[in-house]
Amino acid sequence: MSARRAQELETRSWKLDTEGSILEVQHWRSDSGIQHSVSNVNQALQQAIARLDTVTSTPRLEAEVLLGYVLHVSRTALLTHPEYALTSNQISDYQNLIRSRASGYPLPYLTGYSEFYGLTFDVTPEVLIPRPETETLVDLALARQPATVVDVGTGSGCIAVSLAFHLPEATVTAIEISPAALAVAQRNAERHGVTGRVRLMVGDVLNPRPSQVDLIVSNPPYIPTDKCASLPASVRDFEPRLALDGGAEGLEVIQQLLAQAPAVLRPGGGLLVEIGADQGETVSHLARTLFPQATVRVHPDLAGRDRVLEVRT
Ligand code: GLN
């Protein structure tokens, strides 16, 4: 190789690095002119981890998940074969994913799945990514052993499908205003074998009105509109606004739900609604006004913050 060619390649390599490319397919040693492939699993991971460091507190985990996704292997397989050489297609696929993730795009939208309550759920940018806080609501719902449930704003269907999965006798009606989100919920019901007991309906809160049930559950949008701008960029820029924005005080959908619930609850039925950490007092007051005979409680999430409103009629 001519000295000039070697210099060109070195320059190109340097430029790619400063632009933030995570991998260089080929590296040329200008001293001997020998071409080396430098892209094995370990090197790919190291460079990706460095790249993801600013967007996530778990860069290694995410770099491994994404490489496993590209190679169709488990994270364990990656760790036991750090020397495995990547093809140029695998490198460019990985590079594109790492670039998207480094721009803040959420990991579950890249891989197409997310874990919730021990189950794997399909997710797309049309649905909210299931959150661990919402598992508290599922715990409380399962403890009540309802035979019939309505899930309002089902999104990915994570609540409705988890309940149907763990309550083999129960039937669940899952309502969602976005048909695109409902299609994801449908796939999740199929994935977990509960289509026979999860009825999916396009609707706005409790319209059209479903038949009466033992329990209404919901993780409604509850972020006040003016706080949406200060959400973490990965949420604000990529997750559906419809699933987050609860109007001026963040309580618009919760208010509608509480107002419409009596017509849908069987005598002795109840409600479990996810709320914002600073909404406990306001929503308890609202619930006591609308359900003067009921028992009203606010339950904390695992972090100890107010998270679930419970109404027992
Ligand atoms: N029920 C879904 C969840 O809890 C969607 C909630 C929503 O879109 N606000 O993740």
Image (tube, helix red, strand yellow):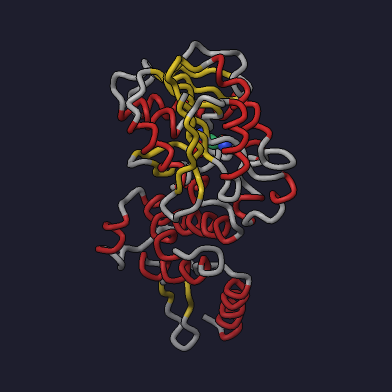
131 or 144, which is in the foreground?
A: 144
What residue occupies the far front of the structure in this picture?
Answer: 293
Write the residue at 36% across / 64% down.
Answer: 41
- In the image, residue 176 sits, relative to residue 106, either above or below, namely above
291 lies left or right of 195: right
Task: Examine the rendering and report whether any part of residue 182 can be seen.
Answer: no
The residue that appears at 32% across and 28% down in the rendered structure is 165
Image location of residue 82, percent across then percent down: 30, 67
Tally of numbered discs: 0
User: Closer to the camera, 218 or 6?
Assistant: 218
Q: Nearer the viewer, residue 278 or 74?
A: 278
Judge left or right: residue 260 versus residue 163. right
Picture coordinates of residue 117, whole percent (x, y)? 36, 41
x and y percentages locating residue 150 in the rendered image: 48, 22
Dividing the picture into quarters, in which one does residue 286 lie?
top right
Q: Is residue 225 above or below residue 242?
A: below
Q: Would residue 253 be seen by someone viewing this image from the given angle? A: yes
Q: Please state the horizontal and vertical placement of residue 93, each as a whole percent of the image.
A: 49, 53
| Residue at x-position 69% and y-position 49% | 228
Q: Residue furthest left?
A: 80
Q: Is residue 267 above or below residue 16?
A: above
Q: Is residue 293 left or right of residue 246?
A: left
Which residue appears farthest toward the bottom when viewing the image?
Answer: 31
Residue 226, compared with residue 309, is above or below; it is below
